[in-house]
Image: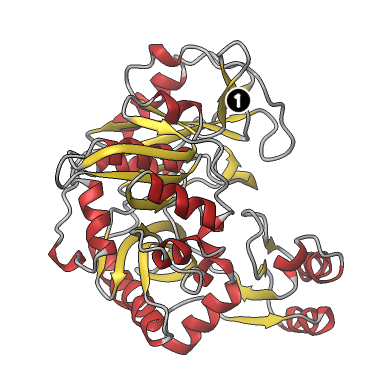
Amino acid sequence: MPPNRLNVLVVGGGGREHALAWKLASSPRCDVLYCSPGNAGIAMEPAVQVIPDLQIAEHEQVTSWCKQNQIGLVAIGPEQPLVDGLADALEAADIRVFGPSAKASRLEGSKRFMKDLCRKYNIPTAKYEVFNSPEQAKAYIRDQAAPIVVKADGLAAGKGVIVATSSDEACAAVDDMLVNKAFGAAGSNIVVEEFLEGEEASFFALLDGSTCLALASAQDHKAVGEGDTGPNTGGMGAYSPAPAVTPVIEAQVMQEIVQRTADALVAEGCPYRGVLFAGLMIKDGKAKLLEHNVRFGDPECQGLMLRLESDLLEVLLAACDGKLADVKLQWSPDAALTVVMAAKGYPGSYQKGSIIQGLDKVSTAKVFHAGTARDAANNIAAVGGRVLGISATGKDVLEAQQNAYKAVDTIDWPEGFVRRDIGWRAIERM
């Protein structure tokens, strides 16, 4: 291998990992970029090799594969392997890894841990209490005003949060989690918290243990329906930058939320190395923390990777090596916007196996794949709920939106659907 170049493994197989693999592979320092398990779109990237059969949950298998293939950096995309301690196993085997330890990943793996940390270290968040007794939880709910939020403590594949509009609905959620075990062990403790009003935004920062480096802001659309209506999803689209995150709010978030979280985890003996994703609620010029995630957002990551002009590989290596203080990020002044194409029926039940055509005709956007695979006839087939992320740039959000929807309309996939209003909040402000 040429001096200074290294092989990289991206762990995951969604749209976020496609964006990370695409960006990392463009680095002059990247020799071979592997992705496991990957997907059909990641496999089409010219400089990427997909490793579908590596068992990510088998940490010894992953570390020995990394050693055999001289991996110089592992970038872990999804939260589950981080919560399960994959970063710890790699670090113990002396393999450089971008992603927090299992202890630090409790920020996402346990809502109770995150909220208790906020209380202890004065990080602004919603008022809350933790319960494992249904009776005590219901008594507390009846003393509070609705709407009120009920959350399963552990990871529940994005489904463990109920925003209840009445006490009865909240009490039903309590029974669902604590009595009926709807989320299994993830719901053996619950967090009941006040409902925060305002505008949501996603804020990302890189941490190397002590130094925190802000990334660009973003805003996603979680609801399945236009006008942000209907059931919540993993995200139907996103754009960057988010006008709601003003320079004043960014400074407040970095000081009161991101840096305090980093300092808190150092004090708790589990310094954080990786990307920290703070879900914010902004009202009256101040941000409060809704939740922390320990990885890039999906679909926010896709737009961030389009806008980032710095060498991502160099930046992640600096984060791993405790050298973020030396890094100055370069961003394109353009806006980026991602429209998610999902299978009809999502977020409920949906058909798998429908064929997607016309991808080679797209000229106004980059198509990041999420739930795709090759079928027996080598067609690109939809195998997930969220299937494609159509990501475009423009001089502003409106132009990026126009470019993204032009690409959407080029793709021939009758079994898919999109929201037609991604970016509406930012466009309304123009």
Kind of residue indicated by mark 1:
Ala
Circle 1 residue: 382
- Quadrant where the image shows the C terminus: top left
Examine the rendering and report whether any part of residue 428 can be seen: no
Single out the residue that lies furthest toward the front. Answer: 68
As displayed, is residue 92 above or below residue 51?
Answer: below
- Give the x, y percent position of residue 412: 53, 13
As displayed, is residue 252 above or below residue 69?
Answer: below
- Quadrant where the image shows the N terminus: top left
Quarter of the image for residue 110 reads: bottom right
Residue drawn at 80 percent across, 82 percent down: 133
Viewer-proximal residue among 77 and 321: 321
As displayed, is residue 369 above or below residue 21?
Answer: above
Q: Is residue 353 left or right of residue 283?
A: right
Q: Is residue 203 left or right of residue 153?
A: left
Quarter of the image for residue 386 reads: top right
Examine the rendering and report whether any part of residue 270 can be seen: yes
Residue drawn at 70 percent across, 32 percent down: 345
Viewer-proximal residue among 235 and 401: 235
- Give the x, y percent position of residue 216: 28, 53
Residue drawn at 34 percent across, 38 percent down: 33
